[in-house]
Image (spheres, rainbow, N blue to C red):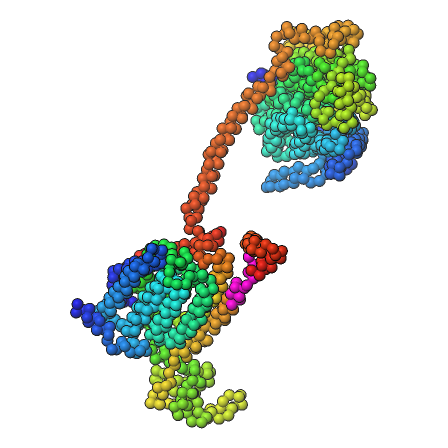
Amino acid sequence: MMTASLINTLSAPLAMAPESQGPAAHLEHLVSHVGTGPGWVLLIPFLPLLGCALCGIYAFTGVKSKLPAWTTVGLLAIAFIATLSMFMGYDGEPYTVQAFEWFNLHYGERSFIANFSFFIDKLTILWMLFVTGLATLIALYASEYMAHDQGMGYCRFFAAFNLFVFSMACLVMGDNLIMLYLGWEGVGLCSYLLIGYFYKKPDAVAAAKKAFIVNRIGDLGLALGIYLTFVHFGTVQYAELFSSDKLHGYISAAAVGDFSMIPSQAQWIALLMMIGAFGKSAQFPLYVWLPDAMEGPTPVSALIHAATMVTAGVYLIARMYPVFLVSEHALPTVAWIGTITAVLAATIGMAQFDIKRIMAYSTVSQLGYMFAGLGLLTTTGAAFHVLTHAFFKALLFLACGAVMHGFAGQLDLRKLSGVAWMKGWGIVGVTMLVGCMNLAGLPYITSGFYSKDMILAEAFITPGYAVIGWILVATAILTAYYTFRVYFRVFVGPQHAEPGDEYHEELAEERVKAEHEEEDHGHHHFHPHAPGWAINAVLIVLAVASMLAIALAYIDKAEHYGWVGSMVAESTASFHSPYAAEAHHAHVDHVAPHAVAGPVGTAAPGTVFGMDAHNAMILISGIGAIVGVLIAAFLHGPKGWQGLFLGNRERADTTRMDAVARRAGPLPRWAENKWFVDEFYHAVLVTPLRVISHIFHWIDKLLIDGLVNIFGFLPRVFAWIIRPSQSGVLQGYAVSMAGGLAVILFVVLVFVVRAGGGA
Amino acid sequence: MMETLSALTGLMAPAQLAFPEEVAGSVLAPYLLVSASMFVIGLIGFLTRKNMIIMFLCTELMFQAAGLALIAFGRHHLGADGQTFVIFVLCVAAAEAAMALALVVLLFRHRETLGASAWKELNG
Amino acid sequence: MEQIIDPIALYLICGLGAAGIALALPRRTPNGGRGLVITGAIVLAFAFGLAALLMGLRANDNGNPQPNFFFYPFALIALGSAIRVITHKRPVYSALYFIMTIIASCGLYLLLSAEFLAFALVIIYAGAILITYLFVIMLATQAPTGEDDSMLGEVDAESREPILASVIGFVLVGLLTAAMFSGVGRLPEPVMTQARAQDGVLAYLPGKADKVLARNGLLDGGWRVARDPETGMAVIDPDERISRIELIEGEDAHGEPLIVATRTLGPEDWPEELRANNLDRLGYNLLNDHPMMIEVAGIILLMAMLGATVLARKHVELEEDLKATQARRLGTMFPEDPHGVTESGGAS
């Protein structure tokens, strides 16, 4: 077994940790003093809930203005400020804040306690910071983006938006797994509601259903995991769970690589929760819902399906990291699945033409990086990548959304060109470039580079995992390629635009429609409407934030590998590879690594080609990113400086790529068709299920229903037989009376009198 | 033949021409036979006739048969209870006649017929 | 109870009776079914005669007490009229035959020494109830006049399932009598003597005893039949024909009659007249043993009166659709009268 052999290499370093500062002791220290926090923390989850209620009231009262949007932005901004003050006021000790008592059941010796309370530690704060912050910004963006729906779905949109933030807050801040599950299902529901926001559009409805159903598979895993947690540890509360002696014992056992001591029940918890994480965070094989989820409004795609909700899986694993550590196969599986997802989604993303879908696949791919990071024991890297990705992916989506909004739903990169040069689109062009650079991971100048570097470096310095490292490096090249493919084709080059022709127009306001019709009748020329101040402001803020995130990599670098590391270090996710520590210390202490350089894959811990892993990554992944960009420029770039003097594209839809694609045989087509994964699922899962369900339908109809019907039919037959007796004919009744009397008399005579006479 | 003749002379025996109070012993059975026959005749009439008035007459016949049986049993026991109950039977019969006939009139007004089968749909 | 008739013969007679009634029941035939009715009558008469004969023979054989001779004609008239009630095609005749049944039953009542009820029956049934029936028959039937039975409606001219009903009926008779004979009704012999049963009630009727004794010159002025001081019953022994009489003068301190002297009258002084008649016993039984039943009977009669009044009102709440039908009909009858519909509808 591959995973089995890998886990031994993974568990080996655990054994190297000094016993006194072993992971169990560290965990013990973390949750030993869980105090009670200030009550205003409750504002963070409940303000969005208030917003949801208000939006509902607006919907009932028929508000047609932008009131729901401003309510949402205002409340979310207050929630963000509360989160910030929570961050400022955090003194290193985790605490809980109880809203109200929820489940408090006692039976015999055991009890089941799951209160509606919130557990605040640095991991929670980290997550809530970008959740509330991004939600505020994206709500502001949506206030303009959704304007065409004012008076129709506007209130509904913001109600669901608020409900999502509330659910996400419950998920992240809950102090027990039941709260997490509540939030988990809540965000799933909101995701469903918002993907299916344009419920008149069959694609959107289908996508919403697909997202919901695929998530059900994962949610089942999570539910079983929670159940098993309670069965095994007797609690679902984090503080109790992480301070339980049982868990500490397991961790100590895992630290010396002795998994045989850990009951398989405890190991299954992580595996089941992992399935939940795969579903929510769109990992292979459950990733198929996320690209389709792009049918929802773009702000939703940006917030839910790129920045926050899809990172819930990462959060789950980070939060339950001690439990994952005690499972022999969980983390290697996470690492490999993340890697496979990353490369698979990247290859699909390369061949797509819908820019939102490209971004969706890129999200899946980046989530794969995060999972690989988690699996490679670098929660810091994963969390850092979550943070940077949240910013730049939200930025990319919002920029794509601005394009979509301005070009009447047009998303096909073959029909757009030179958007950045059009009047009023400069800010979009620049911010999109920032986002693309971050996603591509251009060295030093982008935050995406630092976060990705942390994961890649970890892969190379973990023995036996260099394969993952190389795959991820290759994926980084692909990422850079498909990212800049979009940029080179859509934002630079000769100006060209065809308007989209979908629902967007139908739903648009009367004024817009009249304008369009006029244009159609006139000189077949399309005027895109450039984004307004709200969209531009949000884009700028996000672009600046993406760039500023670079600084996070340098804060607290010496001790915790960056600010995110310092946040993660003081949480239950604070576990990182001793290899990294060693390598890092070797680096900062200028002590030569004790291992010698060897062939790739057998490199001694802590080094890549004999260099410090992080330094090596600047070369390897940095060069990879630049190569990807150059390939994109060569194949898709416009002629002249805009294409870095490599491209030769002169029109919107003719590129060098066409010739390449012709020579590459069926591969590009296969990639465009998503490697037929959907078709495969359809053939392997959906069709057999449909056949089986048809069979069962007929079994149900004939056998079960038949049985039931027979039981219903028998009385009917009986009634049919005796029904004529109630004919309404008076004499009929008298006949029965007389006959009955005769029969009774006869019976009395024969059986009573004769028998009695005989006796 | 001789037996038959003697039976006939037996029937004509002078002692039996005397009035009831002098009759010794119980002669319940013949009266019950008459009562049962009358009841069944009433029953047959009730079952076969279609005219509601005749049907009610038949119920009166059955009442009458019951009354006869009551009187016969009362005589057998030398008590007055049987007769008392015949008074109540009379009572009920009178009440029944009043109600039933009013009803017949009402039903006749609705359907212009006395046939009981005209009200078949009351079977519910 | 002894068997008064051979069972096999009884079943045979039942079969004959069933056949006769089945034949005699009304049916539509070309000649009015007269032949069938006559056949049925012959069969029934034969059955009745056979029954009487066999009963007489049987009684003669085993020396059982036989019914009074008059029983036979009364029974014949009662049953024959009853059969005629159910077989006659014209309701008026049925009712008249029913009167005949009642009167014959009265004869049987007399034979059973229930004189009061016999006459009450004539008055109530024949006099009151049957007159009501006749009224209703005349009110509710549009029977054609004349002898032609073919003009009769289906309701009167036809019977339903005559054979089935006759069979059921006579099976029932057979079973009832079989049950009777096989001892279901094995009755205890009367526990008291006839005299006690007859006159035991006299003790409860001191006023009657006073009157009878006074009428026979057995009581001088101020004398009366002695009363038991506790119960107030007359001190009379009908079995021994002994009675005690007492002399009353004024009242004592408690307002009770003051007894001055008493005397006992022996059987030689017992007047033949001093007997409780049927009416005494019936009245005493009714009022003493069943007072509650009188109340119940009163309520039943009251309810019947109210019910009959409500049901037979002139303005009956018809069903809505029936009302509409009538209104339409009346509307077509009086098309020129704009108020005709409502007025006629209200009057109908």
Picture coordinates of residue A44, whole percent (x, y): 76, 33
Note whether residue A242 is visible.
no
Q: Is residue B107 above or below residue C122?
A: above
Note whether residue A601 is visible.
yes
In this rendering, would C205 be left or right of A182? left
Q: Is residue A492 above or below residue C127?
A: above
Picture coordinates of residue C102, whole percent (x, y): 38, 70
- Please give the name of the residue rendered at 59% of the width and 27% of the height, measured from the top-left corner: A268
In this rendering, would C13 be left or right of A313? left
Q: Quadrant of residue A535?
A: top right
Q: Is residue C46 above or below residue A335?
A: below
* Rendered-image quadrant of the N terminus of chain A: top right
Q: Nearer the viewer, residue A15 or C182?
A: C182
Task: Find the magenta span and give its range.
Answer: C305-319
Residue sticking out furthest to the left:
B2
Picture coordinates of residue C307, whole percent (x, y): 52, 64
- Please give the name of the residue rendered at 51% of the width and 25% of the height, measured from the top-left corner: A691
* Rendered-image quadrant of the C terminus of chain A: bottom left
